[in-house]
Every structure is written in C-alpha cells, then in structure tokens.
Image: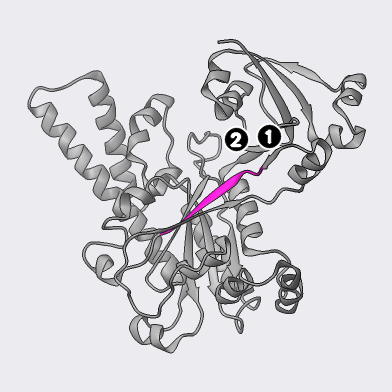
Amino acid sequence: MNIGLIGLPKAGKTTIFNALTGQLAETADYDTGKVEPNVGVVPVADERVDKLSALYNPKKTIYATIEFIDFVGSHQGAAKGGLFSGEGMALIKTADALALVLRNFSNPTIEGLYGPPNPLKDLETILDELVLADQVVAERRLERIRQDHQRGKKTPQSMAEEKMMEHIVEALGSGTPVRNLEFSPEELKLMAGYKFLTAKSLLILLNSDETRYGKNPSLLNSLAAKGTESSASPAQGKSSTLRGGPETPVIEFAGKFEMELAQIDPTEREAFMSDMGIRESARARLTRAAYETLGYISFFTVGEDEVRAWTLRKGATALEAAGTIHSDLARGFIRAECFTVKDLLELGSEKAVKEKGLFRLEGKEYIVQDGDILHIRFSV
C-alpha cells in the first residue's frame, strides 16, 4: 500500500511525512526548488504479529508496510500549469490513495506569501485541481481516439473506449470525480492504465499548530462534508465498481509537534502525547484510516522460519492471497489450510486448533477474512 501526500505549497506535507516516517527530510518556509519526492516505508504496527512472533519464536518477523510519498510542493511548478503539473505526476498516479494536507498553522513568512490559513478553501482548490488534471488526460485521449476513427482505425475496443471517455469527460466537465461513476468490468480494464487521480480514495489531513490542535470541531465537520461530497457513492440501488466510499476521513495532526515527537525516545513519547491530548501517533491514526478507506485487511503466514503479515483487499479470494505471497503459489494452488489468529491465541497451539475442529481446508474461491492464517498447498 502506498499513500501520496499532496497539497498546496507550504501546507506542511514534508512535516507530516517526517512525523509519519521518523525521517528528517528538509522543511523550509521558502520554496527550495526541490522536485524529487521524499519516500519512506514504515511497518504497520499490529499486536497480532507481536503475539504470533512470541508464540512461534521465528527467525524473522515481518510486518505489513505502508509507503508514504511526499510530493514536494513547488510554487513555480504549480504556476506553470496546475498543482499537479511537472515531474511528480507519473509517481502521483502510482499511489493507492491520496492524503490531502491542509495548512492550519500560523507562520508569518508563509502567510506573507500565501495568505492566512484557509483549510476549506484549500481543499476546494485541490479537489478542483484533481478534476482538472484528469480532464486534460481524458480530453486528450478522446481527441486521439476520434482522430484514429477519422483515419479509418476503428475497432470494437476503440469504440468502447470512446464511449467511456465521453462519459468521463462529461462528468469531469461538471466537476464529478471519476470515483463517483459506474463502469462495467470491461470499461475498468480499458481505463486501468490511465490511473485517474479522481478515481483514487482520499484522506484529508488537517495540519494544525499546537495552539489550534483539538479546537476545530466545526472545521473538521465542514472538511468532512466537502470530502464526502467529492466521494459520494453512485445513486441508490446501483453498485459502484470503483473503490471510492461514501465517507472521506478527516484526521487532525499537530504536524510540527508530531514531527518532533517522532524523533524522541519512544518511552518518553506517551507523556508528551498526553499533554497535547493525542491518544495515538500520527502513523497509527493514518494507517487505520487508510485500511478502512481502501478496504484492506491483513492475513498472516506463520512458522518457525517466519511470521509475516500480508495486506489484501477486502473481498479477495484465497487464490489472490496465494498470489500476494508468490506467483508460484497461485499458479499451482491446490488448497489453503486456514485458521484464525483469534482461535490460535486463545487455544495456544495449532494442535489445539485442529482438535477443536477449527482448522479448515478452503478452495481458491474462499473469501479471505481479516485475521486469517493461511498455509497454501500448491504444486508446480
């Protein structure tokens, strides 16, 4: 799973990135001219992994991970054709979800350049820019398709793609994001390569200073309402074929404080967090929201060599889980031996799980559940 941090210049994206990853990427009040994104991979804290590791005492314990990508803001780059123009666009498109960072802190230098903080207006600007960026891509593609058709290069696939792109262009022109549209499985395959930004799940991060943190209930509600409006589900009675849900989570961070918090000894963090009224770290809060928003679950593989957590989309099959572990396991899939972390920890051993009749053999169509432990039987 990877999450792209985006926002207007000087919203504190790199500060949030440092808070999430524990890195010390450069932050500055002025534009540094840097265009390369900061990238950090962090483990997903999961007490189930800790307990499984204590039970099996494996040679390796591997947590699931999240990759955070900080797309460094450039005022000059934004001025030359939109917030999402430039070298970072291709990488932004690879993100599974976009976290929109909104400035809600005082800084005289930054306010002199960009004005006082206005998170709701900034959110509207970013959402508009996302729509505009997709609109440019869709209109250009539609134009090329039509040109090909005029030259006699017309196929059933190109005609289907033309119809799909007309639908997308019309929707984007009215401000409707791609995630709110319905597509057939065939259309989803046609549009997969475009990686439209407005098809991605969104999270909203309000970056507050210490004086504002925890004092913004009405603002948080307004941001949530605006984000939910942008991520509205299709009309009642219709099923969405995209993963955008009806709610966009809004998480408030004391960005600078939490960046500094990430650098101190873990044993001292709890006291500082308590003083600020922060119950969980920035990473823990964003990780939980990302799993819920993207519809991810965790399954596990266990043994004396390795205990490992794997990330999988909710509703995925045992065959897909096998492919997540290794392509050979999916290709030669026979059966999945399955039991749950809950049963194992309650009973204390795999033997006890089997004796209680809680050890199962599942086929390739079995829908994997959060907390399942799988051992794939395969032959290649």
**Marks 2 and 1, how far apart at CA:** 7 Å
Quadrant location of the C terminus?
top right
Residue 154 placement (x, y as % from top left): 16, 22
The part of the chain drawn in magenta is 62-70
Residue 349 placement (x, y as % from top left): 88, 30
Disc 2 crowd rating (10 Å Cα; few below 14, some 14-19, many 20+) is many
User: With respect to residue 212, does 348 lie above or below?
Assistant: above
Residue 238 appears left or right of 136: right
Decide: marks 2, 1 in contact (CB < 8 A)?
yes
At horizontal 42% and vertical 40% (from top left) the residue drawn is 181
Magenta: main secondary structure equals strand
- Badge 1 is on which residue? 299
Residue 160 appears left or right of 257: left
Tell me the element at label 1.
strand
N-term-proximal mark, 2 vs 1: 1
The amino acid on which the numbered mark 2 sits, given as a three-letter code, is Leu
